[in-house]
Amino acid sequence: MKVRGLTIWPPLLLAPMAGLTHSALRTTLLGCGGVGLLSTEMLSAARLPVENAQFSPYLVRTPAEQPLSYQLLVADEKYVPAAMARLRQLEADSVDLNLGCPAPQVRRMGGGSCLMDDPQRVRRIVASCRRATERPLSAKIRLGERLDEASLRDFCHMLVGEGIDMLTVHARLRGESFARRPRWDWIAKVKQWIDIPVIANGGIDSVENARLCLELSGADGLMIGRAAAVKPWIFSEIARTLYDADIPIVEMNLPQLYSGFVTALVDRFAPERRLGRLKEFTHYFAKNYFFGHHLAVQVQSSQSLEDAWTRAVQFFIANGSPPNRLPHHIAALTAAKGDCNSQSPNGEIAP
């Protein structure tokens, strides 16, 4: 799949997720293979111009992380010029506009899914972004507040008319939970209305669901969210099975994957930024174990990264993982850089 000169292959995209789609997860996914386009967390357009790329947990990036889409959370077009200039400096491979986040905090600030209720404001934001870049410009939306085919069609037409190159549709309404079966058939409607690549998002957590989603939606590609943190190898499974990608089958060692994630956190993030991100990742990764809630609870109640690591190692040993397959203690990793307590990253971003 080509989008304004950017090749995305396989057409499997990582969804932007607060607290999750940072450098440590991205390189974990790359180690498993199959990701066609990576993503940052959502980035505040107002704060982005003053973020230090060397220290910001939202901007830290290794050379291997490419192609990488930077997602902007924009509530007002006045923030667009400076934010887009900053993305040029950061050499973003693609820019994505967040028009679908249902989080109450984001909506109160005028961003995310509430923008779909104000098409003219979105029109100005998209037009301003389009004028500011020749890079691929995409947008991510939900189906809206309610099922309204005419309104959704007009909104999608407007996005294309203002220069959006690719559209990702999360196949749920704004108020619907993740437990609700996605409406993949509505993505098929969007696909019929517009002539740019349409990416399906929502509920893609297995090869079987990926296949069903493609059958029902006719989408040009798939975007995977929470399942990427549960099973970082899911991209490679789908790529091999549905896209015949030549990706070697590697036996996944769960403790080693977890160890690599922790090591990446220590290597790339300031001490106060590590523990919250480990807790967020562990919440999902623990689902791989029958009694994974024990791992999640133990890490969640930890007061330091060292404590979290010690508890995780104890859990892995209790579940049959040989101790010699893991570093024995996180102190060996943190000694040179120090560690301290940290809080969850939730709430750190504002539009």
Image (cartoon, rainbow, N blue to C red):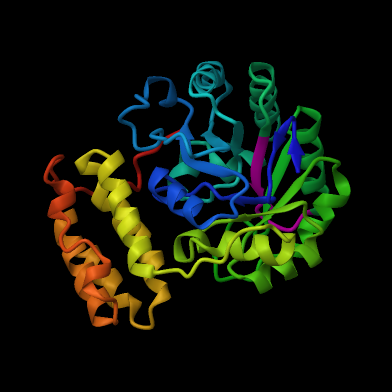
Q: Nearer the viewer, residue 60 or 98?
A: 60
State the residue at coordinates (60%, 70%). Answer: 206
Say whether residue 170 is left or right of residue 54.
right
Q: Is residue 72 above or below residue 191?
A: above
Residue 5 in the figure: left or right of residue 330: right
Verify whether residue 143 appears in magenta: yes
Residue 96 in sight here: yes
Q: Which quadrant of the rendered structure holds the N terminus?
A: top right
Q: Is residue 318 left or right of residue 24?
A: left
- Relative placement, left or right, of 5 versus 188 is left
Give how far across and how far down residue 318 sits, in percent: 23, 81
On the image, the x and y values in percent for residue 124 come to 67, 24
Picture coordinates of residue 280, whole percent (x, y):
35, 57
Image quadrant of residue 165?
Answer: top right
Picture quadrant where residue 133 is located: top right
Q: Quadrant of residue 159?
A: top right
70 is within the stretch colored magenta: no
At horizontal 77% and vertical 55% (from top left) the residue drawn is 219
Q: Which of the pair 146/57 is nearer the observer?
A: 57
At x 15% / y 57%, what residue is drawn? 306
Above or below, comparing residue 303 to residue 89 in the picture: below
The region drawn magenta spans 138-148
Residue 118 visible:
no
Q: Is residue 215 above or below residue 117?
A: below
Q: Observer-nearest residue: 136 or 108?
A: 136
Q: How many marks?
A: 0
The picture places residue 234, in percent across and down from the top left corner, at 56, 64
Residue 141 versus residue 309 in the image, above or below: above
